[in-house]
Image (cartoon, rainbow, N blue to C red):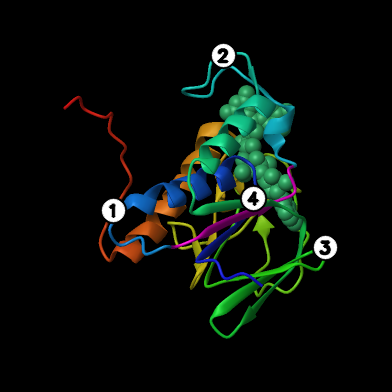
Amino acid sequence: MQPFDVIVIGDGVGGLSCAMTLASAHVKRWWDDRRVLLIGDGRSDLEKARLFNAPGITPGTDGTAVLQTMREQLAQYPAATHLTGHVVHIERCDQAWNVVTETGDMHSTPILILATGYKRWEFEGLPVSPAPHPRGGKPDRISLQHDGVYQVSPNLHVAGLLGGGSSQFAIAAGIGAQVAVEILSKWAGKRTHVHDLPERPE
Ligand SMILES: Cc1cc2nc3c(=O)[nH]c(=O)nc-3n(C[C@H](O)[C@H](O)[C@H](O)COP(=O)(O)OP(=O)(O)OC[C@H]3O[C@@H](n4cnc5c(N)ncnc54)[C@H](O)[C@@H]3O)c2cc1C
């Protein structure tokens, strides 16, 4: 069992956005060798899409290509690990969340983020359960209730459409980034964000 400072479950738009925003803070003075684990079974809704209206994405780009670019963006950061796995069980044990995959691997973390989309809920053991999605448009869409900035309960957060946002790339990615910034601000002990700047010539 490897200790991670935060685990994001769900490697679609919301989860990738969340994990890369978290890991991009690795240059901050307070980062302190933290480690981010993203775990998912690679079945994002974006796999089925061709995007024309997603901000910053070249019109006509396949969703599969966008996801590949996002995976490469995450891989820039040494603090991040991306594992393929289907999570079947999550339990609270003392101050940790233990995340178990169908192959029996277990990963432990103090902070857990669920970004598994608004269609699937396939794990046991969690002390919360989903409600009907307020903006999903279909009766079987689900979401988790939260405090307004995506905290479900202490050290349990929700990102992407499972957080209640409408089904648009920008909204799912935005909720992922917001959750990351909330956690980074806690780690920093003050409000923070991560802005990269172009290198300036000497
Ligand atoms: C056909 C189609 C076309 C679309 N076209 C557009 C468009 O043109 N413009 C636009 O803005 N948006 C579009 N979208 C919407 C966009 O794809 C979604 O808004 C976005 O993918 C939602 O992100 P998410 O992270 O919430 O969920 P997803 O991206 O679906 O990610 C959920 C992730 O959770 C993982 N997961 C779930 N359960 C588990 C588990 N138990 N263990 C491990 N992993 C798990 C899945 O593998 C997946 O990686 C389209 C969607 C569809 C279906």
Q: Percent position (x, y) of residue 140?
A: 76, 48
**Mark 2 to mark 3 CA distance (whole Å):** 37 Å
Residue 151 visible here? yes
128, 72: nearer the viewer: 72
Q: Secondary structure at mark 1?
A: loop
Residue at point 71% right, 36% down?
45
Residue type indicated by callout 4: His
Task: First in sequence, mark 4 or 3: give its number.
Answer: 3
Residue at point 75% right, 52% down?
120
**Mark 1 to mark 3 CA distance (whole Å):** 36 Å
Residue type indicated by callout 2: Pro
The vertical placement of 85 against 200, above or below, is below
Disc on res. 59 = 2
Other-residue count near label 4 (Cα within 10 Å), few / some / many at <14 / 14–19 / ≥20 = many
Disc on res. 102 = 3
Other-residue count near label 1 (Cα within 10 Å), few / some / many at <14 / 14–19 / ≥20 = some
Q: Percent position (x, y) of residue 184?
A: 37, 58
Report the mark closest to the observer, 2 or 3. Answer: 3
Residue type indicated by callout 3: Glu
Residue at point 26% right, 29% down?
199
Q: Are marks 2 and 3 in contact (CB under 8 Å)?
A: no
Q: Are marks 1 and 4 in contact (CB under 8 Å)?
A: no
**Mark 1 to mark 4 CA distance (whole Å):** 30 Å
Disc 1 target residue: 192
Q: Residue furthest right?
A: 103
The residue segment tinted magenta is 34-42
The vertical placement of 134 against 187, above or below, is above
Task: First in sequence, mark 2 or 4: give its number.
Answer: 2
Task: First in sequence, mark 1 or 4: give its number.
Answer: 4
